[in-house]
Image (cartoon, rainbow, N blue to C red):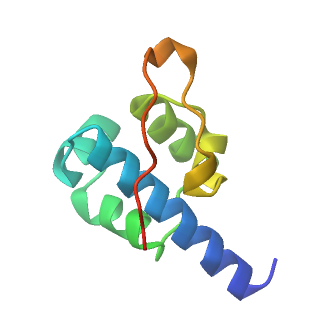
Amino acid sequence: MTENKVASLGLLLGRNIAGRRKILGLTQAVLAEQLGIDTVTVSRFERGSHLPSLLRLEHIGVFQGFCRLNHLKPPTELVVPDSIGQHLQAPSYG
């Protein structure tokens, strides 16, 4: 994978993590505490400057209520499992 593709993936992933966190009304500090990492790491994930491992990505997805693969979809295609019991609107990044 080229550096540009990795950077684009990191930005998309970061936007989706941040968007979902905001929908849930969480601060970076609360998400960090729940995941057992520091706030700086959450910030790096959300900015796309650092990619989480697949295991960490799975923990983020489980905590945020959906499967890790949703983090890789464009925001307009996010799928929330029926178990959440509601439809959430994807955040606007424009």
Question: Residue 79: x percent and y percent?
Answer: 60, 35
Number of numbered callouts drawn: 0
Name which quarter of the figure residue 82 lies in.
top right
Which quadrant of the figure contains the N terminus? Answer: bottom right
Above-or-below relation of 65 to 91: above
Name the one closer to the observer, 14 or 54. 14
Q: Tell me which residue sits at (51%, 45%) in the image.
A: 56
Question: Residue 57: x percent and y percent?
Answer: 54, 46
Q: Is residue 70 visible?
A: yes
Left or right for 31, reference 7: left
Q: Tell me which residue sits at (38%, 53%) in the image.
A: 19
Question: Residue 51: x percent and y percent?
Answer: 54, 65
Left or right for 4, reference 67: right
Above-or-below relation of 67 to 15: above
Name which quarter of the figure residue 10 lies in.
bottom right
Left or right for 8, reference 5: left
Q: Is residue 53 visible?
A: no
Above-or-below relation of 46 to 70: below
Question: Residue 65: x percent and y percent?
Answer: 45, 28
Above-or-below relation of 14 to 38: below
Q: Tell me which residue sits at (27%, 35%) in the image.
A: 34
Name the one closer to the observer, 19 or 1. 19
Left or right for 44, reference 5: left
Which quadrant of the figure contains the C terminus? Answer: bottom left
